[in-house]
Amino acid sequence: MINPIAVYTDSLTLYWSAIVIALGIAACLSMSLALYTSYAGSGRALWVMFPPAVVFSVFFSRLLHWYCHTEQYAGFINALTDYSAGGYVLPGAILGVFLAALLVRSLGFTDNVSRLLDAVAPGGALAIAFIRLSALFNSSCRGKIAVKTPALQHLPLASPVYSGGADDYRFATFFVQFLLMLLIFGILYRFYTRRRNRPMKGGLSRDGHTARLFLLLYGAVELIMDSTRYDSSFLPFNGFVSSVQIISAVLVVYVLVYYSVLSVRVNGLRFSHWLMWLLSIAALGGGGMCEYLVQRHGDWYLKCYGGMGLCILVLCLIGWNLYKGCCAKYKTE
């Protein structure tokens, strides 16, 4: 599929995919500013944060892609200076945004990084949604699952890949992720506006929970969606689980461990904790087994991804339950 050109002059060429990504970044900034200034304070911190956040995000996303695909680049310097080719590993942006938030704090524009990241989280989900939507304006949605049922050979489930003069319909990985990230944006926005000031047990901080919910949900989505891609980025020493899946699993486990520690601290160690931890281990193991099976049996897509989706849903529900166990009840409840 040709990358459609939106604007072309003798000295400038703009592609529609780039315009969609730029709109996503603008939407992220606008949403983050609206939330932060409405509930937290001055927007100066965000204006200072966004330029380095974009630079750091591009750098680390590119660095991860170079590490996983060194064969696509003439060298390390080439990968970081020539952006006309190659690609990015999107989770690198999480590190970029976090470092930018730390930079803003070191410059004295905020004294609460968690509160800042809470305001950025819904906009971040919206930006990722736009980035995935941009795939409709370039090469393909990169899905490796062939969709052979004519009734399903259209969006939102399938998109055409042109090869040899014929249309080969594949699972629309990026478009489905676009829809899922829109859903996550809605969840985060509602969470931020409804539960941002939820009182916590034991004097725990009220800040940082929107950002952690983003990490949990984004990691859960990427665990499945990256598995459906034909161009996943694998680490040089590991050709089984992609780098995106590894990072996503780390994010999910981090959130579960974080709220487990808080829950035990304020509630004491209970039988329910052991039950949730055992379920978490079983769900992680089940998801890993489904990933193994889907790579070994090309016609088990529906069964394997259905099982993987169920395991990841269990992890998300456990994370939510652990968080709620740390919340204090309002007097009216």
Image (cartoon, rainbow, N blue to C red):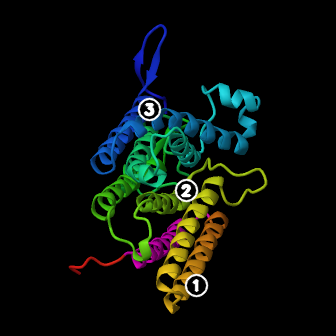
Q: Is-magenta flag for residue 98?
A: no
Residue 88 visible within the image:
yes
Name the residue located 59 percent from the left edge and 63 percent from the top edge: 249
Give the mark toward the camera: 2 or 1. Answer: 1
> Mark 1, residues whose alpha carbon is within 10 Å: few (<14), some, or many (≥20)?
few
Residue at 33% over, 61% down: 196
Whether 226 is drawn above or below 257: the answer is above
Residue on which the image places disc 2: 228
Image mark for residue 278 = 1
Q: What residue occupies the far top of the structure in this picture? A: 10
Counting residues from the N terminus, which is met first, the one under dot 3 or under dot 2?
A: 3
Say which element carries label 3.
Answer: helix
Q: Which residue is mark 3?
A: 17
Q: Amino acid at mark 1?
A: Leu
Label 2, label 1: how far apart the Cα atoms are = 28 Å
Residue type highlighted by circle 2: Thr
Q: Is residue 228 above or below residue 280?
A: above
Q: Earlier in the sequence, mark 2 or mark 1?
A: 2
Most foreground residue, 214 or 16: 214
**Secondary element type, mark 2:** helix
Q: Earlier in the sequence, mark 1 or mark 3?
A: 3
Whether the residues at callouts 2 and 1 have beta carbons within 8 Å, the answer is no
Query: Can you give x and y, in whole percent of width and height, for residue 120 in the image?
Result: 41, 48
- Residue 194 horizontal/vertical position (percent): 27, 63
- Lateral position of residue 261 relative to residue 110, left or right: right
Q: Is residue 285 left or right of residue 8?
A: right
Image position, residue 176 (x, y; %): 42, 53
Quick check: can you spot residue 150?
A: no
Which label sits in the foreground, 3 or 2?
3
Q: For residue 324: magenta?
A: yes
Q: Give the main secondary structure, helix, strand or loop, of the magenta stretch.
A: helix
Q: Which residues are magenta?
A: 298-327
